[in-house]
Image (cartoon, rainbow, N blue to C red):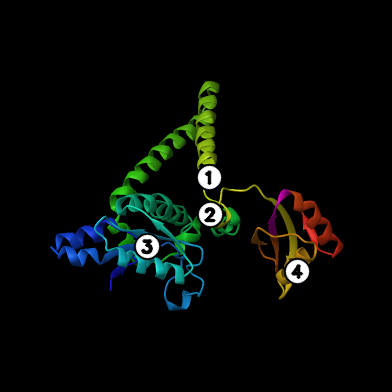
Amino acid sequence: HGYLDVASVKGGPRRELEALGLDEAVLARYLGTHPMSGREKSGPLAATADLFEGRPWVLTPTRDTDTEVLNLALELVSHCRAVPVVMDADAHDRAVALVSHMPHLVSSMVAARLENAEESAVRLCGQGIRDVTRIAASDPRMWIDILSANPGPVADLLTDVSADLDETVRALRALQSADEDKRRTGGAGIEDVLRRGNAGQVRVPGKHGTAPRAYETVAVLIDDQPGQLARIFADAGRAGVNIEDVRIEHAAGQQAGLVQLMVEPGAAPVLTEALRERGWALRQ
């Protein structure tokens, strides 16, 4: 038998076990793991049968880990249809600080700006603010536990973010200046952070963990009625077009929405013509 944990940090638990003075034979049967398939909602009612499917499941063996325990863990990952990823425990903690823990705090900070905002401003919320603040809906108690177990790497990253914020504020203030040279400098500073953002965003893996792909968007206006999405997907299938991704933007104050269908560039004209022929209202 073996012992696995599924905590979202890995270095700390391992060090705590070692500090307890456990027998080496016992430590050899322990393997820290992290199934990276969380959602912003938790609890049994948020469970889904396909929660782990296609998602990374990190395993952090050491050279002392029993091979049988590692094989058992790999078998578990396979049964859950997840993708095993073997990493050093501390490297894992630095990685999740970058791609999960720090972004969660930044999302929360942005969402916190909305708490006391004017209702007239909040009503203007669109897909952009929804994307940025979605994960801020997570349970604070759970995140206090997570961040308490990985404070150093998260603080290091937020120090870098803070430096960028300071520079961006200075650049924006310069844009307010009456001095043309200061405005030019401010514009260059804003462009720098935006371009670095572009460079980082393109490194985010695309569909199925592959390199990011450039898709074209076909936007369809729909009423908020049962069966609308099913009809669109069926019509796309009849046209022989595979929908790579989909996003729905709900219209403010109306029972309608804009369905954005992401397809391969060559398929966009085919899908556009097919949907128009079937009576769908398309938007630019």
Q: How much space separates mark 2 and mark 1, taking CA atoms?
A: 14 Å
Instruction: Give the mark, 4 or 1, whose residue is nearer the N terminus.
Output: 1
Q: Which residue is mark 2?
A: 209
Instruction: Give the mark, 2 or 1, whose residue is nearer the N terminus.
Output: 1
Residue at left offset 78%, top offset 57% = 271
Query: With 37 as the anchor, is 260 left or right in this view?
Result: right
SS at badge 3: strand
x then y, percent, for residue 273: 84, 56
- Asked whether 74 or 46 is in front, the reply is 74
x then y, percent, for residue 189: 50, 31
Q: How much space separates mark 4 and mark 1, taking CA atoms?
A: 32 Å
Q: How much space separates mark 4 and mark 3, taking CA atoms?
A: 38 Å
x then y, percent, for residue 250: 65, 63
Above or below, 228 against 124 in this view is below
Above or below, 180 against 274 in this view is above
Q: Which residue is mark 4?
A: 234
SS at badge 4: helix
The 10 Å Cα crowd at callout 2, few under 14, some 14 to 19, many 20 or more, is few
Looking at numbered disc 1 in the image, what kind of residue is underneath it? Gln
Q: Which residue is mark 1?
A: 201
